[in-house]
Amino acid sequence: MTSPDGIAWTSRVAATSGDWWSITYGNGLFVAVAGNAGSRVMTSPDGITWTSQTAPGSSYRGVTYGNGIFVAVGNGGEIEKVMTSPNGITWSSQTPATNNNWRTVTYGNGLFVAVSDSGTGNRVMTSPDGVTWTSRASAADEEWTSVTYGNGLFVAVGRSGTGNRIMTSPDGITWTSRTSATDNDWRSVTYGNGLFVAVGITAGTVNQVITSSDGVTWTSVTSAADNQWTSVAYGDGLFVAVSRTGTGNRVMSSGEVGLAARITAAANAEAARVAAAAEAVRVAAANIEAARVAAAAEAARKAEEQRELLNILSLLPELGSISKNIGDLAVNNMTKCVKGKLVKRVKLGAKCPKGYVKRK
């Protein structure tokens, strides 16, 4: 079944009938693994139409994607308890660190980490590439059922133990026991939105959910129904859990609905875009107006200069006439004295220089 928002679900047809245990998404493809289906792997590009793929035989319980590769782990009598695929279609067997019952696998901080519900002092194994695996000591030899990675921490949950059904590790190698809020049969753990969330299958109780912000201190949360919750995941603002029991209520969700979140985000983005565009128009208009005012001021200044120049030019004829009149007046107030071809003028009534004779 699929859902765009974790609330409204639609049934889909599997590629083949089988005991499908785990699903993951990577590189544009959904990949599911099974414990008893003939092919044990099916893939889908959209979660709607599924195709069987050929895989090495085992009872696979967990699958994840990381570092460009799909990795699945399993249990049962077969040695082929690990397989890898670069594309979800072509699969190759890999040798596990030990022949334990590997329940789940995750990827984080450049490392694949798988946990087991069997073995002695070796219920964790790690691999940088999904091919070469190394045994690691778990915090306790409990039945570990699920592991996830978030906020720089690996967190695993289990279905056995007293006060130690959670363990954490910063590197997947060194593990520390943690106390869960209750010793329920925890089957799945995930991380999202700054929170670790685990679900369980213990019957007769509604505290089938526990949460933690740091993986260390855990708090009980009331589940939507007293079902056996087997798996939980986070995506697009929503935690979604599924159950193997219940009537018409085998899915529960918590958080902001993904579709609504996307619509809100899109609306906010559009509002921001419109506001930015309006501001850009305002600034452009202000710049254009400022340029217009400056250009008008410059044009007015040049026009004023031109008017002043024209006024000056219009006065030139009058200045010429005044200059001529002044010159004539000066000549009329002078006595002309000559000596051969030499001419001198003296003030009216004054004597001519020696050797000069007055002339009219």
Image (cartoon, rainbow, N blue to C red):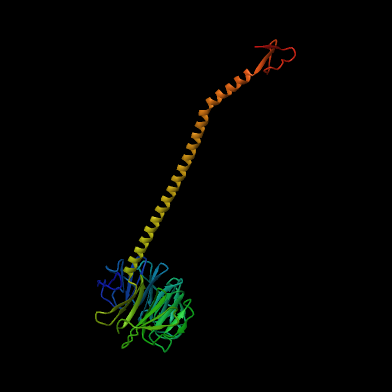
Q: Nearer the viewer, residue 25 or 56?
A: 25
Outermost residue on the right side: it is 354
- Residue 33, picture quadrant: bottom left
Q: Which of 315 and 97 lies nearest the eye of the viewer?
A: 315
Q: Left of 190 or right of it: where is 341?
A: right
Task: Quadrant for the C terminus, please.
Answer: top right
Q: Say which quadrant the N terminus sits in.
A: bottom left
The residue at the far front in this view is: 349
**Image quadrant in which you'd find residue 250:** bottom left
Q: Estimate the x, y position of residue 52 in percent, counting from the top left.
A: 29, 70
* Residue visible at 47% across and 43% down in the picture: 297
**Residue 140 percent across, percent down from the top left:** 45, 86
Count of all numbered marks drawn on residues in the image? 0
Quadrant of residue 163 within the rendered picture: bottom left
Asked whether, in this view, residue 354 is left or right of residue 40, the answer is right
Up/down of 68 relative to 182, above or below:
above
Q: Nearer the viewer, residue 193 or 328?
A: 328
Up-down relation of residue 315 to residue 190 (above or below): above
Q: Is residue 89 visible?
A: no
Q: Is residue 253 visible?
A: yes
Which residue lies most toward the top here?
A: 340
